[in-house]
Structures are given as structure tokens and as C-alpha cells.
């Protein structure tokens, strides 16, 4: 695929497991939609009928029987038709007729396989774009968090997304050390639901578990008491019931995921060259991704590493913000892009 200056028609795509975020070059506000599609049965088999918010509403009302699925998992194409439908909706909202000549910048996991990278390039074309270039999501997040990735100093960022946590140390516009694990926000949601089922015989939907994590979740028992009342079904009686869940309950539920994230960060630091580790004493470790907002996660990592832990200004948007910067910097784009 040819390299060269980025054309104004190109778009940036952050394909999150929870949210698909899209932006174009210029002053237009970014566009986002839930990364969810819903199918309906037809004479030729099931087809995608709803995308984004409409599909999410069906998921929330119908649970696992709604036909609604998340077609992107950990930055990887898991459901081809679903991803194509989401991209077509994004293109219609942001590019319109210009899509036929547009190329996309897509954030992908730094350790994505050749097959996974090729799938993204092929589905971009299937959705109506001229093609695409792939950017490691960790580098995009570091750029979006305004880290000096082009300098010969070490910078570290940990991206806690929905389907994956990625930790990298970067320098001179490249990744020096990286680790990635498929443990992040969705795994925590599942653990919260399992905890309620195991300890209180309470069945809740995935959206309810996600809301619990956002509203009262914590990586360790919080210093301030927080709680929320949740509704679900009593598995013993089948009747609706409620339960008051505390931040400490959630910390117990997600402990395994938090420990795995902590271990990934420590593994990266152990493999980082000493001179770059020294840089981190001053610059610290940045957190990005929606999961980075989990209460006390910064404290857990600070205690484990002894380093300053800082939350990016807009953690959910860090990857997309980095991609948008690359749309306007062809030289840097050529240094960080992965070709398909």
C-alpha cells in the first residue's frame, strides 16, 4: 500500500469493543456509537438489522436472546458482517459520498497477528472505503495523551479498554516494550455479574453489571463508602429483587482482573531498558481507555510500581485523539503506521 501524505478525506477509527469512535480531519466533532449489532431472522438466514444505539437497546431489553452481539473484541474483527455494518453507518455519518476515495487510519492492538490486521484492511474496503493504514493502539493513545513519543526518552502508557489491556513503553516514535492481555472492562463486568450470582443468587444483565462498575466500582476497597441499589432476578424464586452493592463488593469481584493488569504493568517495567526506566521516574505512567477510570486503579499501580500514575485528560478518547493528530502529520504517520 503506498505511503504518502494523508488526504483530507481520510478518517480515523478507534474500534473499541464497547464504542466505535470516528473522526475526520478538520473541526467536525468526533462521532461515536455503541459497538453493537442486532440480527433478525430472514428467509436467507439472519442478517444485521440494527446497529449502534438501537442494537444496544435491544441488548438491554432482551439479554442474550435479543440477537444483539458485539462484533469487535479487543480491537479485533470477530463478526465480519457486524463490523462491516457498523463501519457503513460510521461512513454515512462522517464521509458520505467521499468514502469511495477515502482511506482510514485504524487503531489495532500492537500484537495483532497478520491475519487480524488483514481482516481490518479487507473489511474497510468491504464497507466502501478505498483502503486503510493500521496504527498500534498503544502509540495512538500515547500521542493522544500528549506524551513526547518522538523524543529519545521513555514514555509509558497503559490502555485499559473494554476487551484488552495494553501496556507499552515507547521512544523515538516506536514501541520498545509491550504487553497485552485480554483482561479489561468486559472481564470486570462478567466478574461482577458472577459475584452477584455466586454470593447473592442474583442474576443481572451485562449492562447492569457495567453500570455497577462505573458507578461504584473500585480496584480495591475505596476510602469512601459508596453503594448503589441494583435490580435483578432471584435465581431461587424467579422473582424480581433488589440488592445494595458496595464499592468493596466490586473490588472483591474484580480483584483477579486488577491483579492481572498490575502484573502486565510490572512485566513491561521489568523488560524496559534501565535508561528508559529512569525517564519514567519523572514522567510517570499514564492511564487511558474507559477502564482507566476505575476508582483506585491508579493507587494499586502506584503502590506496585513506585511510580507516579497519571490519568490522561480524556482517557476514553486518547486513542482517537492520537489518530486525529496523525491525520495532520504525514511524517509521523509514516513512522508509526503498520502496513497491511
Image (cartoon, rainbow, N blue to C red):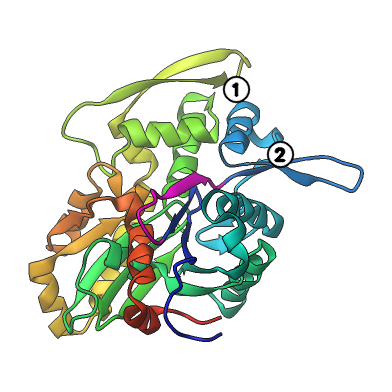
Q: CA distance from mark 2 to mark 1?
A: 23 Å
The residue segment tinted magenta is: 25-35
Magenta stretch, overall SS? loop
* Picture residue at 57% right of the left edge, 20% below the top: 233
Q: Nearer the viewer, residue 209 or 41?
A: 41
The numbered mark at residue 67 is 2
Circle nearer the viewer, 2 or 1: 2
Observer able to see residue 155: yes
Relative height, residue 305 to residue 27 (above, below): below
User: Vertical placement of 128 versus 338: above or below?
Assistant: above
User: Where is the N terminus found, in terms of image quarters?
Assistant: bottom right
Q: Is residue 229 left or right of residue 108?
A: left
Picture coordinates of residue 56 (x, y %)?
Answer: 58, 36
Q: Which residue is mark 1?
A: 235
Q: Secondary structure at mark 1?
A: loop
Q: Is residue 225 magenta?
A: no
Task: Judge the density around disc 1: few (<14), some (14-19), many (≥20) Cα neighbours within 10 Å.
Answer: some
- Looking at the image, which residue is at 42% across and 32% down? 211
Position of 220 with respect to 103 (left or right) is: left
Amino acid at each position: 500500500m503506498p505511503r504518502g501524505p494523508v488526504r483530507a478525506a481520510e478518517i480515523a477509527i478507534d474500534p473499541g469493543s464497547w464504542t466505535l469512535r470516528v473522526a475526520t480531519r478538520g473541526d467536525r466533532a468526533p462521532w461515536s456509537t455503541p459497538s453493537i449489532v442486532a440480527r433478525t431472522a430472514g428467509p436467507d438466514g439472519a442478517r444485521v438489522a440494527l446497529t449502534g444505539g438501537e442494537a444496544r437497546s435491544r441488548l438491554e431489553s432482551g439479554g442474550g436472546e435479543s440477537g444483539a452481539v458485539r462484533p469487535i473484541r479487543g480491537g479485533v474483527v470477530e463478526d465480519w458482517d457486524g463490523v462491516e455494518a457498523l463501519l457503513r453507518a460510521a461512513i454515512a455519518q462522517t464521509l458520505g459520498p467521499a468514502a469511495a476515495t477515502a482511506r482510514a487510519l485504524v487503531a489495532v492492538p500492537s500484537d495483532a497477528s497478520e491475519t487480524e490486521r488483514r481482516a481490518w484492511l479487507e473489511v474497510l474496503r468491504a464497507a466502501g472505503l478505498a483502503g486503510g493504514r493500521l496504527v498500534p493502539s498503544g502509540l495512538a493513545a500515547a500521542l493522544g495523551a500528549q506524551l513526547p513519543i518522538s523524543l529519545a526518552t521513555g514514555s509509558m502508557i497503559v490502555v485499559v479498554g473494554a476487551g484488552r489491556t495494553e501496556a507499552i513503553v515507547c521512544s523515538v516514535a516506536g514501541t520498545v516494550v509491550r504487553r497485552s492481555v485480554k483482561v479489561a472492562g468486559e472481564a470486570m463486568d462478567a466478574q461482577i455479574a458472577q459475584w452477584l450470582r455466586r454470593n447473592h443468587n442474583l442474576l443481572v444483565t451485562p449492562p447492569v453489571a457495567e453500570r455497577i462498575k462505573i458507578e461504584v466500582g473500585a480496584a480495591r476497597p475505596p476510602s469512601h463508602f459508596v453503594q448503589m441499589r441494583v435490580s435483578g432476578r432471584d435465581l431461587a424464586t424467579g422473582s424480581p429483587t433488589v440488592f445494595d452493592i458496595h464499592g468493596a463488593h466490586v473490588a472483591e469481584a474484580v480483584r483477579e482482573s486488577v491483579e492481572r493488569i498490575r502484573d502486565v504493568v510490572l512485566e513491561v517495567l521489568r523488560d524496559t531498558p534501565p535508561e528508559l526506566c529512569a525517564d519514567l521516574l519523572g514522567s510517570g505512567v499514564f492511564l487511558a481507555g474507559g477502564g482507566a477510570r476505575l476508582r483506585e486503579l491508579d493507587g494499586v499501580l502506584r503502590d506496585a510500581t513506585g511510580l507516579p500514575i497519571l490519568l490522561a485528560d480524556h482517557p476514553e478518547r486518547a486513542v482517537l485523539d492520537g489518530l486525529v493528530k496523525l491525520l495532520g502529520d504525514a511524517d509521523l504517520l509514516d513512522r508509526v503506521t503498520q502496513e497491511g
